[in-house]
Image: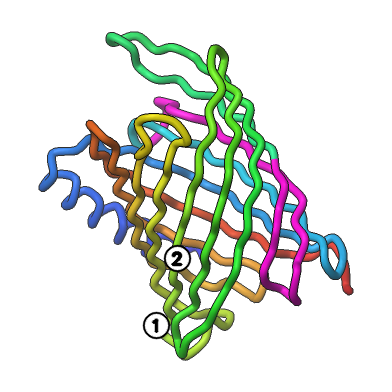
Amino acid sequence: MRKVFTKLAFTVLGLGSILTFAQKNDLGAWYMYFGNNKISKKLNWHNEIQYRNFDAVGDLEQLLIRTGIGYDLTENNNNVLLGYGFILSQPYVNGEKKENIEHRIFQQYITKQKFGRFYLQHRYRLEERFLEDDFRMRFRYMLGVNIPITQKELLPKTLYASVYNEIFLHFNSPVFDRNRVYGALGYVINKNMRIEAGYMNQIQENRNRGQIQIGFYNNIPFTKN
């Protein structure tokens, strides 16, 4: 597993560096953990930590912690979820680092589909954002696709490609917030765990920035039901 992870990381780091140099963007890095664990036949616990840096490591841009309880409307699919997020941001303002804290409540709906080798996921998310001096609401839609490479299905020990596009829209003006385009290579460790290393380009109204992303996904159930 360590060899696979290292190869994925170096491959994507090289790709990200080339793309970033060509587009003259500064390159950040996001290290992410996602847990989606069954706690009953219908209920799941979502838990997530993202450590986002302005550079490869050490210069914190944002620490994001999310959790929530989801409910499957159909077996292992069509999941609705209510969650909470804590976000610590440390942006640079006029060359000096500032600190902002945001509390976020969110509701989301995820539905999955499979067409041949293509594993599709649609995620619709509504966010109520409580910032220090403001309140905002935002809608997000993400379309993601996983495509197995070394096997026909996403079975253990399968190398796969992953891509997604996510758009963020404000409820007030300006409506457009940002758009994220992502591509990665992933590896299925076993039926409950996988890793990904990819490159994400985030487009905002006046900014276009690249991010290296390394993620670990844990779906180990807490129940045998």
Q: Which residue is nearer to you in this view: 214 or 92?
A: 92
Q: Residue at x 77, y 61 (%)?
A: 71
On screen, residue 26 above or below 17: above
Residue 71: in magenta span = yes
On screen, residue 11 above or below 159: above
SS assignment at label 2: strand
Residue 132: in magenta span = no
SS assignment at label 1: loop
The disc, 1 or 2, on the residue closer to the chain's N-terminal end is 2
Q: From this viewpoint, which residue is outermost toward the left?
A: 22
Residue range in magenta is 57-83
**Would you name the residue on which mark 1 appears?**
149
Mark 2, Cα crowd under 10 Å, few <14 / some 14-19 / many 20+, is some
Percent from the top left, x then y, of residue 70? Answer: 75, 56
**Would you name the residue on which mark 2 appears?**
144
Quadrant, the C terminus: bottom right
Q: Tell me which amino acid carries mark 2.
A: Gly
Q: Which residue is nearer to you in this view: 218 or 6?
A: 218
CA–CA distance in space, label 1 to label 2: 16 Å
